[in-house]
Image (cartoon, rainbow, N blue to C red):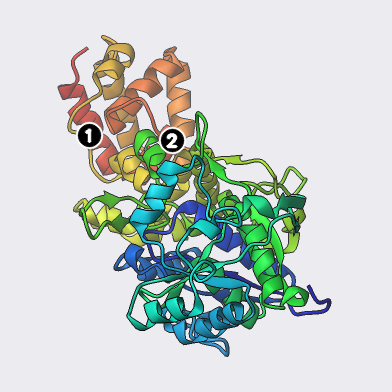
Amino acid sequence: MEENRKVKVRFAPSPTGPLHIGGVRTALYNYLFARQHHGDFIFRIEDTDSHRFVPGAEEYIIDALRWLGIKFDEGVGIGGKNGPYRQSERRHIYKKYVDQLLDEGKAYVAFDTPEELDAKRNEIKNFQYDSSTRGIMRNSLTLSKEETESLIADGKQYVVRFKIQPGEEVLVHDLIRGDVRVKSDVIDDKVLYKSADELPTYHLANIVDDHLMEITHVIRGEEWLPSAPLHVLLYRALGWQDTMPQFAHLPLLLKPDGKGKLSKRDGDRLGFPVFPLEWIDPKTGETSTGFREQGYFPEAVINFLALLGWNPGTEQEIFSLDELVEQFDIAKCNKSGARFDFQKAIWFNHEYILKKSNEEIANLFAPIVVGNGIDEPMERIVKVVSMMKDRVSFVKELWPLCSFFFVPPTEYDEKTVKKRWKTDSPQVMSELADLLARQDDFSIEAQEKAVMTWIEENGYKLGDVMNAFRLALVGIGKGPGMFDISSFLGKEETLRRLSKAITAIKA
């Protein structure tokens, strides 16, 4: 690659379905690399495979990246000097390079039907369309020029194959894996172009686009590593070796348990999302949940993904996007796969709940409160959040834990009653109610001082009193400090709940 070129990277997904979380990580690493090097980040859609196109997939990808805050400098939906950015809209560009390879004898036309190819695979073990077999197939190397031109003129469908020369050593320098050397003999004569839809395959289209868009670094998933030698050969064949980008192949995301790469089935089996947003399959109607719909913050997802396959070399785990840009180093990415620890993703979301202000969390929680038929001023919702947010990993978990702040208990947890409600609890709670009724100052501090003095003077056990008090007000043996609860409820509501419990709970 030429020195002193401005860094340019690209994210180029295919609209064949929802964006997998592994694809999100690829986009993120490209973004971090571009920003760190003050370069450009291009968004391209690789839709040359018309048979695999799925309606709504492109819009889904754009929405997902927008939600996550991964921004592009040019591309689909943005524009720029290198457009169009959908490969299906660039078909007029690719044919020029197909013809160049044909004219220079670096590619050839093949007419073999799928049935003929299947027959050869059955006939020849480990069949590969290459220098050892192309001479027995129906292509422009075995047919005369006249026969070839006649078949094309008659509308016979054909493909253009890259003519791989055997006996070469292909060197791929990878920024993560170092030098990878491959013998050209193991590479088959890949299809570069199909006359059926007049579109190139991925292999040619992405090379042409990367060259014309001046891409300097190709950062993509490990699954594309086997195709890297082919791409190196294509750059050479087209005379672009001096502008060939540097490659970096990211490690796979692995299952949380067992062997193999992460799949949607793992998410279904273990109950976690593998897509950033909810996806409804247009064919089956099947709904797959997303990180957004499960209540994850986009910042938490970004932070979690950044550390799946890359390590800053320090103990720091919580990073803002700006901090990730500053510290990211593609050379520190792991070569081996990264296990997808979804419990860690939950931990990250909890940490981001703690990082966010009480007001911010309250704004997210308020619609849930309203949805449960409660009309409370925002300042009271903020107060509840301040007491309870450290106990949850998702905002949606707040209501089950703290609904008692807004709705008095209608029943009392049976196990807690058996354990905490003593035979003398009704009498003690009646005395406590009388004491609290006499308090003019119902602040946390005033209540605590009065109640603790009363407990000591009467020789009561602190645990017995406070556990029964909690059961009366909350309905279960959990929650924040009791005087935090009673102060929030106020004197009238506290006394009302005590009175009800004294009557309703049977030891």
- Where residue 81 sits: x, y (%)? 57, 90
Indicate whether 307 appears above or below 34. Answer: above
Kind of residue sitting beneath label 2 = Pro
- Where residue 260 sits: x, y (%)? 51, 36
Label at residue 258: none
Q: Secondary structure at mark 2?
A: loop
Residue at 33% x, 54% y is: 115
Mark 2 or 1, nearer chain start: 1
Closest to the observer, 277 or 52: 52
450 on left or right of 104: left
Can residue 117 be seen at all in this image of the molecule? yes
- Where residue 472 sits: x, y (%)? 28, 28
Can residue 221 be seen at all in this image of the molecule? no
Residue picked out by circle 2: 480
Residue picked out by circle 1: 409
Closest to the observer, 119 or 311: 119
Q: Secondary structure at mark 1?
A: loop
Q: Name the quadrant of the C terminus.
A: top left
Residue lying at the far right in this picture: please name it: 3
Kind of residue sitting beneath label 1 = Pro
Residue lying at the far top in this picture: please name it: 423
Residue at 50% x, 34% y is: 256
475 on left or right of 3: left
- Where residue 431 sits: x, y (%)? 30, 23
Q: Separation of disc 2 and disc 1 at Cα?
A: 16 Å
Indicate whether 116 appears above or below 38. Answer: above
Q: Name the quadrant of the N terminus.
A: bottom right
